[in-house]
Amino acid sequence: IVSLSCRVKSAPTNGADVQDTPPPVLHFGRSCSTSSQSHIKFSSSHPSLTPASTTKSRETKKHMASIQEQSYQAEKAALTGTGPVLHSQASYRKKWRKSLLVARFTTILLNQKKEFVPHPLSFAEGSKALLFGNRLNILLVFVPLAIASAVTGGSDGLVFSLSCIGLLPLANLLGEATEKVAHHTNDTVGGLLNASFGNATELIVSVFALNNGLIQVVQVSLLGSILSNLLLVMGCSFITAGIRWKLVKFNTLATSSNMSLLLLACLSIIVPGMLESLHDISDANELHLSRLIAVLLLAIYSIFVYFQLVSHHSLFEEEEEEEDKDEEGGTTKEGEEEEEEAILTMSCALFWLAVITVLVAVLSEYLTGAIEGAAEGFSMSEGLIGFVILPIVGNAAEHATALVMSYKGKMDLALSVALGSSTQIALFVIPVMVVYGWCIGQPMSLMFGAFESAVTFLSVIISAVVVNNGQSHYLHGTLLVTAYVIIAMSFSLRD
């Protein structure tokens, strides 16, 4: 039996005040009888605790309990939205919604990351950050050396070698300057700039080579750029990622789109070659067919750019967002701290974009003019120069970027560099060169030859099989690199 003591303030009875008396003692007990019913024993020492006052107290407690029950039911109706809406319920619901919105916005503000937007640098500081921000730019000293050797009448082998080395940092700077300009535009314009200048070095070199009548060198170098990105870069990316992870996973949405476009480009190259080999078409009609196909490919590329940047851009943006999430199979972000990107002013970025483009054009002219002499001096075939050396010179910076991204586990970005560059060359650069040859009177066509068409088609098929399931490992990378080595040796030994 538990005994509790409490003071009870006596209430007025019949309008008369009751004097203070010693507090009563309330005994709350549970009997040990079989009924086990609780009972309360009141001592008779307090005069106000009569049976009538006890009954009144019980009625008051019942009334208070009824009020509490009504309040609880009103709160429940306000929260669940059931039952008749009274004025008190509507007021409670309004307060509840207000507090919920405040809590929601407070959570969003607390979880939102405060991104620091750096102020654009001045012209001098921006130029310094652009020119000295990469160790590869040390090779810029070879640019004036190449120009001086060409002006002073140096040997073709010397001019070719210095021009190749000088183009390595210029190709990287051209891409960086394009990104600096795109920073001051919206996403669509920035994407168009990157799509246009992504392979500007290959385009400029091909233009000067075509001006010199080196049609075969242009065809082989463009095919070499496609296959080097498709086999060499993607294979090395898989091997690099396989060093850290057993299985590499990536998004198949963008890869499937690029592989479909590459298969269409292979069809465009194979059809003229098959008609030529079967002697079912004349040379004039074959050239006319190539030009019509080139126009169609440019239209398809325009549709693909619209698809990627406007109508279905969310499919490609999801890849970049998933890189910051923890995933299994080689897509885990290790927490590397990215270096702060220097922001240039619009005028500074445009200035350096124009200067670098002019320098690339100058060295490309010297390079293409010395190809034949360098091939004889170094005892190399023009096929090896066009298939191996020129693509590496124009895409060295992109190759390095893909390897770094794959080592960090960002396979979607690495594949976007490799497959995106291949797709751009196949559907944009090659058709543009065909149309440009049409304008200057050069018979540049899509008839690349039976051997070139076959190896291109087989390379695309192998790459499509590798990326089909959305995951890969170092064995797949080894297969792709081996395929590239086989094709490169065949071009170097071909008469």
Image (cartoon, rainbow, N blue to C red):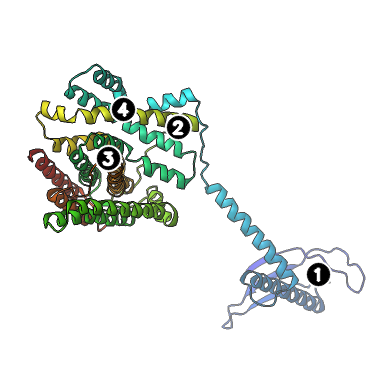
Q: Nearer the viewer, mark 2 or mark 4?
A: 4
Q: Does residue 471 appear in this view?
A: no
Residue type at numbered disc 4:
Val
Name the residue rendered at 78%, 73% in the picture: 44
Residue indicated by mark 1: 46
Give the quadrant of the C terminus. top left
- How crowded pointer 3 is (Cα within 10 Å; few <14, some 14-19, many 20+) is rated as many
Instruction: Tell me if label 2 and label 1 are in contact, CB under 8 Å.
Output: no
Q: CA distance from mark 1 to mark 4?
A: 114 Å
In this rendering, is residue 108 above or below 215?
A: below
Name the residue rendered at 38%, 34% in the picture: 176
Q: CA distance from mark 3 to mark 4?
A: 29 Å
Q: In the rendered structure, find residue 362 and report the number of the disc placed on it.
A: 4
Q: Position of residue 85 (x, y in %)?
A: 70, 74
- Looking at the picture, tell me which residue is in the foreground, 423 or 325: 423
Q: Going from the N terminus, do you reach mark 3 or mark 1 first? A: 1
Numbered disc 3: secondary structure: helix
- How crowded pointer 2 is (Cα within 10 Å; few <14, some 14-19, many 20+) is rated as some
Q: Is residue 376 left or right of residue 301?
A: left
Residue type at numbered disc 2:
Leu
Instruction: Tell me if label 1 and label 4 are in contact, CB under 8 Å.
Output: no
Q: Nearer the viewer, mark 1 or mark 4?
A: 4
Quarter where residue 199 is shown? top left
Q: Position of residue 302 (x, y in %)?
A: 38, 52
Q: Nearer the viewer, mark 3 or mark 4?
A: 4
Residue type at numbered disc 1:
His
Q: Going from the N terminus, do you reach mark 2 or mark 4 first? A: 2
Q: In the rendered structure, find residue 403 and report the number of the disc placed on it.
A: 3
Q: In the rendered structure, find residue 350 and report the number of the disc placed on it.
A: 2
Q: CA distance from mark 2 to mark 1?
A: 99 Å
